[in-house]
Image (cartoon, rainbow, N blue to C red):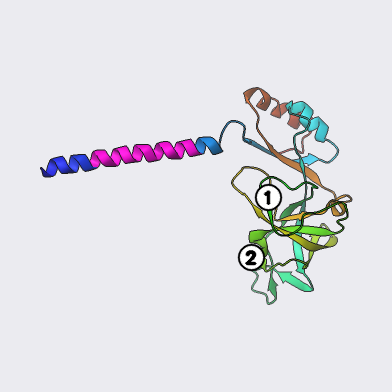
Amino acid sequence: ALFSSILILVLSLCVSLAYTNRAILNEWGLKFNSSLPNYFFIDIPKDKPNEFKKYLQIDVNTKLYPVVQARLSKINKDDLVNPHSGKPGRKGFHRDLKISSFTALKDDNVIVEGEWFNSNSIREVSVEDGFSKHLGIKINDMLTVRVGSKDITTKVTSIRNVDWQNISPNFFLILSPDVFADLPYTYMTSIYLDNTSSMNISKLIQIIPSVN
């Protein structure tokens, strides 16, 4: 009787695990279907987006995101210090950031406070929600970022919740387009390439060697 009870218990667990695994795989199948990006590309020169799309044979409307490397150096009048340095002062972020700029809010970003950019936006910045909480950033704060040797100060006009699980480029800081115009940006993107298109990557790198 004891053996029969144990056998029934084991079989029940196996059936339960089978259904659980199937549910997980079904969920993954919905999230990771063949239309989702399977390649990331960075350092696409700002003057070669069309060549990039041409050599990979991808849709000309594929979204490329302008990016620059920057360091958040000041919040309002507070100079920020590396949180691992042991120095006194307001703690900043521990590394440089890739920041971007675009006019239309991405589908995987939701404004939770403030307003997204409009045609009259000048020197504004949108901040990711978790990043704002980590550094105590609020609406109407003034953020200064350093790009190379240039300091850029912008006003926080929105805070966004970001879906980080969708395999798409996202950013802690997004600047209004007027700020980005004169910066030495490159492009990045995430795209889906089938086996045929992926064979063009080596040719692309020969033509545009900076691409990674």
Kind of element beneath mark 1: strand
Q: Label 1 is placed on what type of residue?
A: Asn
Picture coordinates of residue 67, whole percent (x, y) = 77, 48
Highlighted magenta segment, given as a residue range = 10-27
Q: Residue at x 72, y 67 (%)?
A: 138
Quarter of the N terminus within the rendering: top left
Q: Residue lying farthest bottom?
A: 88
Q: Where, by quadrant of the figure, is residue 66 drawn? A: top right
Q: Is residue 75 left or right of residue 14?
A: right
Q: Residue lying farthest top?
A: 196
Q: Label 2 is placed on what type of residue?
A: His
Q: Is residue 96 left or right of residue 150?
A: left
- Determine if the magenta segment contains residue 195: no
Q: Residue at x 70, y 76 (%)?
A: 89
Report the disc number at residue 134: 2
In this rendered view, identify the residue nearer to me: 159 or 41.
159
Picture coordinates of residue 45, whole percent (x, y) = 81, 40
Q: Where, by quadrant of the figure, is residue 176 drawn? A: bottom right
Q: Judge whether 135 appears above or below 173 on screen.
A: below
Q: Residue at x 50, y 38 (%)?
A: 28
Q: Do tag 1 and tag 2 residues touch (Cβ < 8 Å)?
A: no
Q: Judge whether 88 appears above or below 104 on screen.
A: below
Crowding near the residue tagged with mark 1, few <14, some 14–19, many ≥20 C-alpha atoms within 10 Å: some
Front disc: 1 or 2: 1
Name the residue beneath numbered marker 1.
109
Picture coordinates of residue 64, whole percent (x, y) = 76, 40
Crowding near the residue tagged with mark 2, few <14, some 14–19, many ≥20 C-alpha atoms within 10 Å: few
